[in-house]
Each structure stands twice: as C-alpha cells, then as structure tokens.
Amino acid sequence: MQHIDSRDGVRNLLLTICYDGRAFHGWQIQQNAYTVQEAFQTALTKIIGADFDLKGCSRTDTGVHANQYCISLKTAHPIPAPRLKAALNRWLPLSVAVLDCVEADEDFHARYSCKSKEYIYKIWNSQTRNPFLEGYALHYRYPIDENRLNKAAQAYVGKHDFTSFCTQDNRDAGDLTRNVMAFSVTREGDMVLMRVKADGFLYNMVRIMVGTLLRIQQGKIPDDGIPEIIAQKNRQFAGPTAPACGLYLNEVNYD
C-alpha cells in the first residue's frame, strides 16, 4: 500500500469499479497471489505515480465477482476525475472496469463510511450445464423449490450472532453480530437468485448461508432449522461453504 505525503492539496476520490473475479485472489493485496488491488494499484501508479492512499470497501474471496465495488483514493495529483477514469480503463486488465470517479468528502472512507452491502448468489438450476456460465454461477442439477427456501431464509433476517455462518480467521476476531436487512430467493427461468443485504458480512458468510439453504432443499436440515443453527454459534452445525463462482458483490450503499 502506498501512502501520500502530508501536505496541502490532498483530494479524496470515490471510484466505483466492477470486476470478473475468476483471475483474482480477491481484492486485498497478498504475497504470491494476484489480486484486484494489485492490478488497480499497478494501473494507478502508471497514471499518477506512487504517491496515494487507497482503501477498498470490502474483502472478497478468490473467484468472487463484483457488480459494484467502491474505493476511496487520497492523492495530491491534480488529474480531473473524468480523466482518471478514462486513463484507468486504458491501463487496467480487461477483467476490471472503472464505472465512475467523483470527488468525495475529506472524511469519506470506502469501508468505514459504508451503511450496507448487498450480495447476490447465482445458481444455474438445470440438469444441463450452461458453458457460458462456467465460473459465473453454481451449476446445481437437482430441483430447487425457491418458495420453500425463501421462506426458510427469512430466519436469517435480523440482528444475530452469525458465528455458525463464518469461517473463523484473524479477520473476524471480536464481535460476530451482523444485521441482515433482507434475504430473498427468487427464480428467473433456470436461474435461482439468492439476494442478501446486511450492514456487514463475515468471512464466507453468504456462501455458508447458501450452502445451508441447499442442505434444507436436500432434506438434510429441517425447513425451520436456521434459528437453531444461529443459536448454536458453532460452524459445524451449518451447511457447507458454497463455491465462490456464484457470488457477486452487487451494491455498496453509503446513504
């Protein structure tokens, strides 16, 4: 991570991007792994040099996509926001695009100013695989009753300790309570969409929620079993972690 020098004239920019996560090991810089942040910083350095400070709105896992991802950028470089957007889209890999670039308040922070995020999980529910969705949706061959799962998923809604729906590591030490504002399971033809909005998410939280709903569909967890799983505060009681390919960060809200 680069840091700006302490001096007058520092600007704060809000950049909105989208990316295909297949080529990346998530957002955050890692050793020996190519990430979206690394690709973004490499392109940015070519345009304004290394004197900047960059913050992303969220970590994302390897293979997870983003329809909307927000970045706060502090820099003293005078490049106009529209020109920075155009230049980044020239230098970024084709799997990443800048959708918008605007001036932001001095105290805006892409992560800490966020009020809520929405994720979508896509399931291609057909006996026949779709080659155009490989890497972009989970192929699930067996029947899914979206109305049944939508009803079961309402138990996620509310403020709960989601320890049972978290892969524990150092990133989630501390309070594991999150407020889920909405969860829906809908169908568009053979595509089943699971959509969840919350004030924050734990490591693998959405993917474990999806895996648990699929276990309900399979009859391995009772339809009304989610409240008990939440109460257990134990990862072993929830379903498996669904594959990353179907997960998209869909919206980042600051209002």
Image: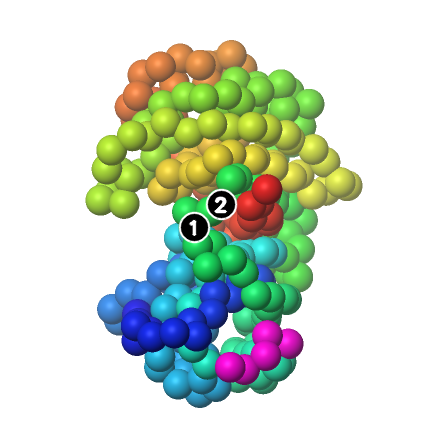
Q: Which residues are magenta?
A: 78-82
Question: From the viewer's perspective, is 195 left or right of 211?
Answer: right
Residue under the image location 57 percent in, 83 percent down: 87
Residue under the image location 45 percent in, 84 percent down: 48
Can residue 111 be found in the magenta stretch? Answer: no
Q: Secondary structure under badge 2?
A: loop
**Which amino acid does the dot numbered 1 rest on?**
Arg
Colour mapping: rainbow
Quick check: marks 2 and 1 in contact, CB under 8 Å?
Answer: yes
Q: Residues within 10 Å of mark 2 (few under 14, many from 20)?
A: some
The image quarter containing residue 202 is top left
| Residue 225 rendering spot, x and y as whole percentages | 46, 14
Disc 1 marks which residue? 111
Magenta segment main secondary structure: loop
| Residue 228 rendering spot, x and y as whole percentages | 40, 13
Residue placed most toward the observer, 85 or 197: 85
| Residue 148 rendering spot, x and y as whole percentages | 64, 20
Residue placed most toward the observer, 143 or 236: 236
Residue under the image location 51 percent in, 66 percent down: 13
Q: Is residue 129 visible?
A: yes
Q: Is residue 133 above or below residue 199?
A: below
Quarter of the image that includes the C terminus: top right
**Tag count:** 2
Disc 2 marks which residue? 114
Quarter of the image that includes the N terminus: bottom left
State the residue lying farthest toward the right: 189
| Residue 114 rendering spot, x and y as whole percentages | 49, 45
Residue under the image location 60 percent in, 24 percent down: 149
**Which amino acid does the dot numbered 2 rest on?**
Cys
Q: Is residue 33 visible?
A: no
